[in-house]
Structure formats: C-alpha cells, structure tokens
DNA sequence: TTGTAAGCGTTATCAG
DNA sequence: CTGATAACGCTTACAA
C-alpha cells in the first residue's frame, strides 16, 4: 500500500542506498541526485518506515517519559516543556504514567522501556538506589527533573533558597509560630526537594531563635486533599500557628480551605505561603515561591538530547534554575506585631 | 549485548519459530516446550525487540494520542484514562501535544503519526472536515473524545442535557438575566460541545420566555484568563446579568475573580455556574456540571482497542456518558425573588 | 507439534 | 559519488 524506499529508488533510477543517504541529508550525494530523489519521494508520498530504520540502525529516535501522575498540574507543565524540545528534534515521546504505587511497582518490575527508547526522562519521581540502578541498567542516557543522581542529567531548582525565601518572608512579617505542611513521610534519598524545603524551614526557624516542634508539622502528600487534612490536624493541636508554609501550592489550597471552614481568615488569622506558583495561585491570591516548570522540562530534554548526540554525559551534575518569591494576599504581618503592622495595607479580595 | 530470539532458540534447542510462538502464547506449542522456552528466555533476560517484531508483523502495538494541551486539567484527566487502558493491553502511548495553533498546523501538515501507530486517539480537538480527512488517510482506527465523526469511534457526554441542567438550575432560582461565557468564536463543525452547550442556553432561555441578546454573551476561549476577560466585557455592558453560565469551570473561575474584583459578590450579586467539575471547583465552591473525564478517556481507549482487535468499527457512532449537576455555593436565588427566596439557606464560605 | 525459509524496510560496509 | 550486499530481529506461510 504505501511506498517503500525501493520504490523511490526504482523511480529515481538510483540504488536504495543512495535514496537512504539522500533523504537523510548525508554527505556524499550529489545535489542533483538528491534533488531528484527528494522529488520522487514526495511525489510518491514516501514516508520512512520507523521499524525498518530502527531495526537497521539500532536507534529508536524515541524518548521514554516517566511521570508519576499526568493529571497533576506540575507534571502537565513539565511534559509540555519536554515535548516541545523532543518534537522539535524529531524524537517520539513514549509516555509512561505510573499513577500511584501499584503502577510504580509494576513499572520497575517490568521495565517496559527496555529496547524501545534511546533515552529516558524521569519527572520528579522519588528515586532510591534501587530505582536508580534499574534505570542505569537500561544503558541509555537518563534525564531527571527535580532530583540529582550521579551519572544522570538533571535539572532542578534551588529548593533551599526557595523555601528560605518563603520562610524569611514569614519571619519578617513577625511570625514565629509557623507550621509546616510537608510532603510524604518516606522520601528516598535521591529525591531531595521535600527534604531541602524542610531543611530550610528548620534553618530559618533556628535563625530567629525558634525551636522546632513536631506539633507544628503535618504531612500533606502533595495533594489538595492532603493539605486540607494536614491543616485539620494542625488546627486540632494545642498551639495554633499564626502562619503556614506548605511545600506545594496544592497543599496550600487545601490548607486555606480548612482554615476558612474552621471560621478563621487568611491572612488575618493565619498567613499561608505555598510553593510552585500553580496556575490557580494567582486566582486564590496565594503568596508562593515561583519555579520555572515548563522550562525545567525543556532544559532537561535539551541536556538529554545533547548527551545523546555527543555521547558524553553532561559535565555539570545538575543544572539549577532560579526561583522567586511572589508575594500575594495570603500572607500578612502578624496581628499586633509592632514591628511590621504599620507596613501593612489591606488587599482586595481575590 | 542483549540476547535475541535466536539465542533463546539455540539454548532451548528449538527453532526460532517455536520460540516466537511459545513466547507469544500462541497455540500449537506443547506445554513442555513452552515451559522450557520461557525458562530459557528469562534466564537470558530476553526482551523482544519491538523493531524486529513491528517490521515483521506490520503492527506497532502503539497508539498515538493527540492532545491540544497536555497541561490543561481536562486533558491530563483524559490521558490518565487512556493510558491505563492502553498500558493494561500492552500498547505503547505515543504522545503528541499540539499546544496551540502553530503546533496544530505543523501536525496536520506533517502528520507525524504515519507508519508509526496502529490507531489514534484524538482528545477534544476541534475537528473540521479537512482534519477528519487527514486522520482518515492514516487508514487506522481513530478514536475521539468530545466529538463525533462518522466512521470514528467516539465517546462524549450529553452536552445539551448537561447545559440544560445548569441553565434550568439558574432559571429555577429565578434568574432571567443570564449571561453566557462561551468557548471560542469559530468552532469547526465536528466539535459540538460549545455549540450544544450554547444551544441549551438558548433553549432554556426561550422556555422561560426570555429573548436572547448578544449583550449577554462573551467568548472566553476555555481558559481562566479568557473567562476573566469575558466577564469584564459583560460587566462593562449596559445590562448587568444576575447570573452567568460558563461553558467550562476554568472560565467560571476567571469570571468569579472578575466579579469579586469589581466589588461584587458571588452568589449574592451574581450567581455563577460552570461545566466540568474541575478539581478546584469544590474548593472554590462552584456550582457546576460534572462530567466523567477519566472515564471518557478509558472508554474511548477501550472502544479503540476493540476495534483494533475485531477489525470492526464500533456499531454505535458515539457512546454518551452521563453528566450531573453539582450544586454548590456559587449559585443562589435571585435576590428578592419571592418564588425562590424562602428555600434559600445561606451556605458556609468555601 | 515443530522446523525451514522467505520476507519486512532500512542502514552500513565495502567496493567501484 | 554510487551501488551491491549483508545484516538487523522477528513473523509467518508452508512443509514436515
């Protein structure tokens, strides 16, 4: 039904080998021959057969993209960045959505990418040594967003700096009773964002002479529902915080809701700061730490393709992109704090 | 480096053909032979070469998934549904993100799926005759979510019913000055959701004896920013609506923000109803029409795989999934309406 | 039930 | 600069 390289060769009056070279833009083909071949090819509507090409060359021109949850804002953004770079380079994107622990286990048990990709991009997936080893066993370039592993290409943000900015913002506003809504409980060693953000929380507290107390920490699983619940726990404890730092915007959204349901106001009673600058953060007037999400995906994909093209893994272990504190209406000076309250002007409701 | 089918054959002391049959679970292989082959195969860590298999069989075991914007809530959900079905069936998912008009044009100009997929799933993409023809030219089963085209497998919701429920809800609350925030201006013939929803708007208005006026309609492009702007236009006109029906939740979110920024309250001054039941709808206390999004993806994928397996296109032109009105706090009786106000109890803030 | 052998559509090596 | 020719790894009649 559809025409093959041999068909093109026959009609152009040259050998298949020449057609192959001509169409791929290889040297050692005279321009007149190439022109003829190209013309015949698109007269015939010739399209190369990927299977044939892959079998013969050994390269798939495909990148596997492994993502925990396609349906979460963050991953949709990263994929957008990755996709545009891959597409522009003529690579196919094979999507693997893990979607929870079951899918994750199945993935690592079967490693379905074996023999079908030239490289793999892993998006913000908590990775331990075993997982890193499983990827390494594929013997293809691996790119990471959000974590750094020796021997892989990585792009991340400076989580410490971002979280520090968020926390300093709160302490400058006079807050001292600051709660933390963290991610999950057990994060593998190579997935540092939750650890780094928590570390910054502790350090900033320490820098203003406040002692850490577990009473002011709750886990929110990086989801809205988790944030909602975590905030519930926090409000149920003895000391009510005057501010909350959530490790992600979605958790912050959940927390804001719980606060309001409890009859309290944001920011008058409790200030809330998130992390990400989610699409909805502006709408909900949430103070947050903006990170370049699409760009992380694009940058990581670019590094991966460079690696593929050069054969050399990237020199730098992980590229670090900047974050920026975006102050909105969900954070305000501590009520009655003499130091800061005179700077405070009321903001319009979102 | 990695072992081939021939390696397995040699070690198992059988022919390559037998290995092929044994590993694929085909009949006409004795159980003892199959057992031996399987054992040798995983001793060797044998993994089939997709390229070889594809070239020989002509089937790619891959489905191309074409999506307008991966980073929008709706599409992330649909992809999740599609992915789980494909993965379970052992199919690969090749992702094509159009990401706007430029990408869309490039896609249709190049049709990069040619020769690389067994079937295509098109997610809520506005499709005209030309596009439908382009897909048909691939000569593979095509699945659609959100539109119906003759000869394609389709899954959609009853947009008329959904929008009617939303509009009736508003008219029952006493509203008569109801604005519509519609999608884009130019929707191709085969992409009916915006048309159907608008039709329902007109019909319900008509059923209560209200005449349509363009003053009460604005386009929001199915985005939050678009909804924000559309609401701005509506408020700038002579007649201020007492209620707004937005064709998507994201547009509704934007509209709510504009309303509040204008110093008005939702629902006291203006009721707002959306469409989708977006993750954030509950948080923002938005009355909306819930549609089963993940399930639409899963159902469409299932139909597509059935078609692929049987060779028969689905009998029914498009499967229709139900919607359901979810009443939350963003809609309330028309202020001062004697008919309905006695039923109204105040709701807690979100 | 199993084996033989001819492809499938490219690429790549090596002559010419 | 161009052409034979041998892979690449598997599937699938067709035979046995």
Image: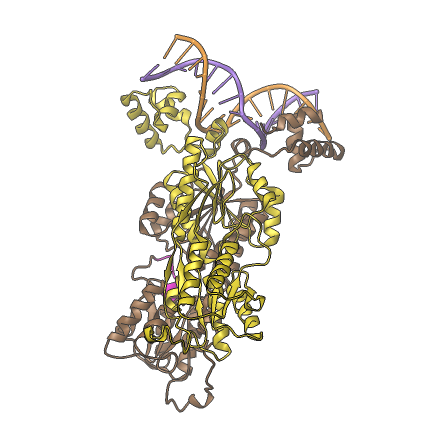
Chain colours: A brown, B yellow, C purple, D orange
Residue at 54 percent across and 63 percent down: it is B220
Q: Viewer-proximal residue, A238 or A191?
A: A238
Q: Is residue C6 above or below residue B264?
A: above
Is residue B71 among what the camera can see? yes
Query: x, y (%) of residue A34?
Result: 72, 34
Quarter holding the N terminus of chain B is top left
Is residue A190 within the magenta segment?
Answer: yes
Q: Is residue B100 above or below residue B330?
A: above
The magenta stretch spans which residues?
A189-196
Q: Is residue B30 above or below residue B162?
A: above
Is residue A23 within the magenta segment?
Answer: no
Quarter holding the C terminus of chain B is bottom left
Query: x, y (%) of residue A136?
Result: 41, 45
Q: Viewer-proximal residue, B115 or B217?
A: B217
Query: How many circles with numbers are drawn on the protein?
Result: 0
Q: Viewer-proximal residue, A240 or B106?
A: B106
Left or right: B283 in relation to B188: left
Query: x, y (%) of residue A122?
Result: 44, 51
User: Farthest residue toward the right?
Assistant: A32
Left or right: A212 in relation to B58: left
Is residue A277 among what the camera can see? no
Residue at 69 percent across and 32 percent down: it is A43
Query: x, y (%) of residue A210?
Result: 32, 80
Left or right: A293 in relation to B322: right
Q: Quadrant of residue A197?
A: bottom left
Q: Is residue A321 above or below residue A346?
A: above
């Amino acid at each position: 039904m559809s025409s093959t390289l041999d068909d093109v060769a026959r009609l152009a009056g040259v050998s298949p080998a020449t057609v192959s070279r001509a169409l791929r833009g290889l040297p050692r083909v005279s321009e007149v021959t190439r022109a003829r071949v190209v013309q015949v090819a698109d007269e015939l509507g010739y399209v190369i057969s990927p299977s044939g090409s892959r079998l013969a060359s050994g390269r798939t021109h495909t990148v596997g993209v492994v993502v925990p949850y396609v349906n979460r804002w963050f991953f949709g953004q990263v994929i957008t960045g990755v996709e545009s770079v891959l597409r522009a380079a003529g690579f196919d994107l094979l999507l693997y959505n893990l979607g929870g622990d079951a899918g994750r286990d199945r993935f690592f048990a079967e490693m379905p990418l074996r023999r079908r990709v030239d490289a793999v991009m892993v998006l913000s997936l908590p990775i331990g040594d075993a997982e890193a080893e499983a990827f390494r066993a594929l013997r293809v370039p691996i790119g990471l967003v959000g974590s750094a592993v020796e021997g892989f290409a990585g792009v991340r943000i400076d989580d410490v700096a971002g979280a520090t900015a968020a926390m300093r913002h709160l302490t400058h506003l006079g807050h001292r009773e600051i709660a933390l809504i963290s991610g999950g409980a057990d994060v593998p060693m190579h997935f540092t964002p939750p650890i780094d953000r928590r570390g910054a929380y502790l350090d900033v507290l320490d820098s203003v002479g406040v002692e850490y107390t577990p009473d002011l920490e709750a886990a929110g699983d990086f989801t809205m529902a988790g944030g909602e619940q975590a905030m519930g726990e926090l409000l149920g404890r003895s000391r009510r915080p005057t501010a909350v730092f959530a490790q992600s915007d979605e958790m912050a959204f959940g927390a804001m809701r719980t606060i309001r349901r409890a009859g309290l106001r944001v920011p008058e009673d409790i200030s809330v700061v998130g992390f990400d600058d989610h699409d909805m953060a502006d709408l909900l007037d949430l103070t947050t730490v903006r990170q370049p999400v699409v760009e992380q995906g694009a940058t990581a994909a670019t590094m991966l393709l460079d690696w593929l093209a050069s054969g050399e893994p990237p020199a730098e272990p992980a590229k670090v992109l900047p974050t920026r504190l975006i102050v909105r209406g969900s954070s305000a000076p501590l009520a009655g704090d003499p130091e800061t309250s005179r700077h405070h002007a009321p903001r319009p409701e979102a």
